[in-house]
Image (cartoon, rainbow, N blue to C red):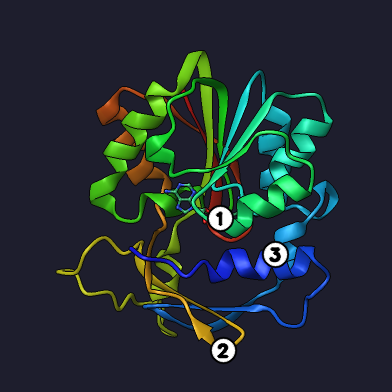
Amino acid sequence: MNLKDLFGNALLDYQNGNYTEDIITSTSISDEDVLPIPYLFRGFKDMPKLEKKALKLAKGSVLDVGCGAGNHSLYLQEKGFKVKAIDISKGAIEVAKQRGILRAEEKNILNETDTFDSILLLMNGTGIFQELSQVSKHLSHLKNLLKSNGQILIDSSDIKYMYEDEDGGFWQDMNANYYGELDYFLSYKDKKESPMKWLYLDFNTLSTACTSVGLKCELIFEGEHFDYLAKLS
Ligand SMILES: C[S@@+](CC[C@H](N)C(=O)[O-])C[C@H]1O[C@@H](n2cnc3c(N)ncnc32)[C@H](O)[C@@H]1O
């Protein structure tokens, strides 16, 4: 996948005081939506409860996977945690560094080799697994990055509701792939990013995948819109 890093460009524009417009997203099953860039620079008080809960559970050395502008890393670093932030977006890492994150690296999670007490994957953390067939590979790798008694804190949503029609029926094609596998489209300043795969996982499917790789999966928190936080250990 060859990304133009429009996401990173948008973060850099905001960071450098050149914020003029937001990111537009859409998916294979939903119309265009605005992703406000200020939300990608949220402080603790503007975070959803689920993220606050995850930050409160953090312990020891922390890896923030897909850190974006580095909101979660920044909060934890300020609290005295030893934090490493990684992202495949060059622009995101540049922003994270500019914001003061001491250890920020442009890196795919599958290339990470250090070990940690806590690994965070937040704002639909299962998204980076891309598709159901890739979940076990990512979970096994994440498990190998855990120190003893370490934990993975990850959020996602059960998006079954997106397939519900007005009379309460579901329209998804039973022969299709898992319903949380979406194509994700992003545009910024009239430029279109290459299409990406983005995975939403319901808790039971995540839990089954965890069992298959020897991770314990606990439901920590449920949000108001089918979203949840899980702790894997
Ligand atoms: C939805 S954003 C979340 C950003 C940030 N965690 C937040 O909550 O504001 C997902 C991030 O994951 C990054 N990402 C996607 N795939 C990745 C991978 N395989 N390894 C590391 N980062 C990845 C993207 O570049 C993007 O910055």
Q: Is residue 68 above or below residue 187?
A: above
Q: Give the residue furthest to the top.
A: 148
Q: Which numbered disc flags the more N-terminal residue, 2 or 1? A: 1
Q: Residue at x 73, y 64 (%)?
A: 39
Q: Name the amino acid, label 3.
A: Leu
Q: Which residue is mark 1?
A: 90
Q: Name the amino acid, label 2.
A: Asp
Q: Name the amino acid, label 1.
A: Lys
Please tell me in which quadrant of the rendered image residue 182 appears: bottom left
Q: In front: 160, or 186? A: 186
**Can you see residue 223?**
no
Q: Residue at x 68, y 64 (%)?
A: 11
Left/right placement of residue 63 relative to residue 141 reads: right
Q: Residue at x 62, y 27 (%)?
A: 62
In the picture, the disc for residue 12 is 3
- Badge 3 marks a residue whose secondary structure is helix
Q: Which numbered disc flags the more N-terminal residue, 3 or 1? A: 3
- Badge 2 marks a residue whose secondary structure is loop
Q: CA distance from mark 3 to mark 1?
A: 10 Å
**Residue 214 in the image, given as x and y percentages of width and height:** 31, 22
